[in-house]
């Protein structure tokens, strides 16, 4: 992330992040590629949803369809999207993030029995005041955050 940010420049990283769904004001500094600007979990899920959707950005939806117990679809919801990343780039990024689950900081998912095509991204803020995980597979993204509104409160490790 650091090398890529140096190569393309922090301004371009910010532009791509915004195209992918980040709406918070970003600090356009060399560390932007490490995620040093504060953003919400919903923004993160939106941005990584762009990756999971082959580069098409869509507004996050909490419900995509309603089914009966036997699997009959009663209603389905789709949102329009715009291609903001190339399909190739989105698939490369998704492939890189598979390593987070297979051998990285998200490998606890496999240890807990999670199976299938999974990718993810973990993150913490300074002094471990917040922790988050965005997990995905092609076509679906979920996110989880733990923390406190007061950044003076933090985890021990």
Image: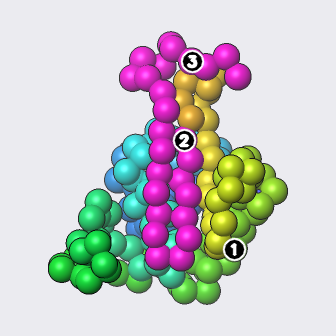
Q: Answer yes or no: do the residues labelled 2 and 3 have beta carbons within 8 Å?
A: no
Residue at image coords 56%, 47%: 133
Local SS, label 1? helix
Given residues 29 and 44, the one toward you in this image is 44
Local SS, label 2? strand
* Residue to which mark 2 is pinned: 132
In the rendered structure, does residue 83 fall within the stretch colored magenta? no
Residue 110 rendering spot, x and y as whole percentages = 72, 56
Whether residue 64 is visible here, answered yes or no, is yes
Given residues 67 and 93, the one toward you in this image is 67
* Crowd class of label 2 (few under 14; some 14 to 19; many from 20; radius 10 Å): some
Which residue is situated farthest in the right direction here? 103
Given residues 4 and 156, the one toward you in this image is 156
**Span of residues in magenta:** 132-157
* Residue to which mark 1 is pinned: 95
Which residue is situated farthest in the front direction here? 70
């Amino acid at each position: 992330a650091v090398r890529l940010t140096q190569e393309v420049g922090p301004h371009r990283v910010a532009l791509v992040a915004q195209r992918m769904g980040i709406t918070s004001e970003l600090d356009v500094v060399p560390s932007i590629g490490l995620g040093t600007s504060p953003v919400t979990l919903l923004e993160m899920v939106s941005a990584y949803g762009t990756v999971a959707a082959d580069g098409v950005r869509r507004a996050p939806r909490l419900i995509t369809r309603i089914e009966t117990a036997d699997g009959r679809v009663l209603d389905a919801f789709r949102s329009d999207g715009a291609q903001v990343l190339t399909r190739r780039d989105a698939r490369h990024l998704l492939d890189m993030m598979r390593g987070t689950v297979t051998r990285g900081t998200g490998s606890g998912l496999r240890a807990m029995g999670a199976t299938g095509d999974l990718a993810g991204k973990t993150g913490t803020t300074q002094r471990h005041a917040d922790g988050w995980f965005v997990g995905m597979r092609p076509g679906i993204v979920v996110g989880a955050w733990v923390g406190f509104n007061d950044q003076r409160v933090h985890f021990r490790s």
